[in-house]
Image (cartoon, rainbow, N blue to C red):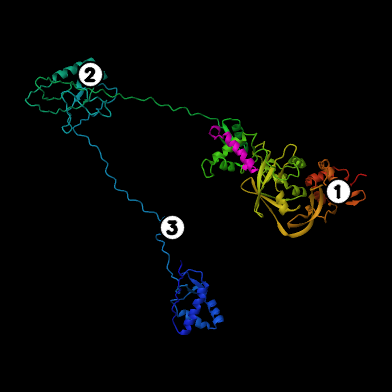
Amino acid sequence: MVAEQATREPDFTGTRKFKTIGARAFEVLRAHGMFMSGNAPIRIPVEELTDFLVDKDGVKKADVLTALRENPDIFAIETRDEVEYVVTTREGHPPNAGTLGITHSFAERFMTPEPKPVRPVRPPVVRVRVDPNWATYAVPDFGDEDDTVDEVDIVAASADAPTHLDAETVAPEPSLTAPVLDQSLPIVDLVEEAAPLVPAEPAAEEQLEEVVAATQPEVAVEAEPEPVAAQVAEPAIESVETSPVAEPEIEQTVEPAVEPVVAPPLVVPPVAQVVAPPVTAPPTPTFRVSDLSAYADEAVAAAIDERLASDSRFAHFAGQWMLEERVPRLSRGDLRRMKEYIQEQEQPLTDTTLVQDILNVRPNSVEFPLMQFAVNFRLSREHRDFDFVGTNGQRFWSTSGLPQIGTTRRKPNEIGTDYRFLLDEGASADAVGTATSIDHVLSFYEHSLGLLPYDAEMQTLLPRQVSDDQRAAVLTFEIPQSYTTYLVELRYPTPNRGGFLLGLDDFYADNLVPGAMISIAATENDGHFRIEYLPAADQNARLMELDDRRSARYLFRPATITCEVDPDWLISEDRFPRLGSERPLDDKVRRRPEAVVDATFVRIGIEDGDSFIASFPDLLAAVNIERPFSPTLLRTVLEQDARVTGDGSDTYTYVAAS
């Protein structure tokens, strides 16, 4: 249950007159903002409010202004763009001018980074200290390897770092530069093991034995054993001559029944200096690089493409190359699903669509370009099931059994035969794909079949074939004025048929008439184009159409022209009245251009006995009813026909056979 809220009436100040005017002004403002919230500001220009109250209540304008100013707790006057407004709210007070606090809003917290955390003080690194009781042998300087060891002096070690010699074992500290000895072996064993390492001469061995015999320490026997520290230093080589070795005295306290074991001095062999043989760098392979500055870039690129194309280790498609072993492979199931998907859509599909819908790879994935190349390369090997009908920027794939793009009134092979004359009027190879836009006027033949000729002008705009064996390409034509896009099939010329474009019949029937002027512009995508026409004021005329419901014949019907047209190409009843009820020429007659020209003279020419007179623009527009004619082809036929004569002013006379 919702309880009704009671609206509090504000308390007005001033005299009774001004209170009444103030209450009336507040009612007007509250009625103006009846659907606003209680604190929402309600604004009305002061001039409009005063005029309203003056007209409705008959009060004075000055009294209204006085009533507004004497109630500052209810009304507020503010100026915006040099216009004064009276402002209040439904609750009867001026709106608060406070600002919304955003110090703790999500946006403020999102844009204000947190301070970096304070890292604790790094604790000092614990260093392992070595017990000073451990003795370390320092490697003596043996000099050059060619010097001969002649004298060994044994110097007592320092008292701060004594070396403890036990009666049974000696445990020297291994050094990084001296040979490492096993510390668990008795000193006699160590000497026996180390002795073979010293290639001493016989004279040196005798002197060593004498020194050992003369320096044997005396053994003192006491009641209690007392350890005595012996100080030993490593031998040092000073001169070539051999000097007696001074053995330090070793005091030992042993049991009476145990004889002391006196070890001969430890002789450390000199460290041999190994001289590494000089490292010879492998010879740097030399390559013969030819000077390519004299060749054009296109010639060098063509040579590289030819060389790579002959190597089976490389996979290539539309100017892209990759090692064949790194190209992902498609299973037979993937190929089958792609073919069925194209047939289900009943139109060619791009490689982008196949990768997304069949292989489930997203466009923002790093593998998407690789899978695109894999699809294009693998499908190009499946000639029996797939046909490439795309361009470099828009790669369409088609399969057999798809419905024909464009009109069904005439077969594509018959249309290609009609355009066979374009093989002699083609553009140069350097001009293909160089234009950005062209203008074209539709003929009756083109309008009725929804096509465009692949003539020299059109070749400068449309892309060339991706591969030499490509027969057709599917393009997209966008119509910005009707917000529609059509699939258009470009049939490339063959040795005995001309090229043309099919698929614009619906666009022509809905928007254009024969003689309409259109403009075709290229885009960044070489497979996408834009068509625009010039709109014009509506005009009514009787234009010729082909009625093929029962028996094919030409007739004139009322039509509305909403685009700009070229009068020389307009087929109207006022211009060619005798074309009404004419039947199309037989295919055998229509295939011969000279026969079509003769029939056109009889249809549209001004009769003068056995002669028919017609101008060149009229002939050009009329012959394009039966089959396509270019101005060059028409002039060639007129010059070669013996029954046609010209007067030099584009007027021709045809003499009919008797």
Label 1 Cα crowd, 10 Å radius (few <14 / some 14-19 / many 20+):
many
Label 2 Cα crowd, 10 Å radius (few <14 / some 14-19 / many 20+):
few
Residue 636 image position (x, y, % from top left): 81, 43
Q: Is residue 243 magenta?
A: no
Q: Using the image, determine if residue 296 lies above or below residue 235.
A: below
Q: Earlier in the sequence, mark 2 or mark 1?
A: 2
2 and 1 marks in contact (CB < 8 Å): no
**Residue at disc 1, secondary structure:** helix
* Image side of residue 400 versus residue 37, left or right: right
Residue 115 image position (x, y, % from top left): 36, 53
Q: Say which residue appears at 74% left-offset and 47% top-offset.
A: 449
- Specify whether residue 292 is in view: no
Numbered circle sitting on residue 601: 1
User: Residues in magenta?
Assistant: 323-349
* Image side of residue 552 versus residue 24, left or right: right
Q: Which residue is mark 3?
A: 107
Q: Earlier in the sequence, mark 3 or mark 1?
A: 3
For the residue pair 541 and 32, the one nearer the viewer reads as 32
* Image side of residue 208 versus residue 73, left or right: left
For the residue pair 314 and 351, the one nearer the viewer reads as 351
Q: Which residue is mark 2?
A: 192
Label 3 Cα crowd, 10 Å radius (few <14 / some 14-19 / many 20+):
few
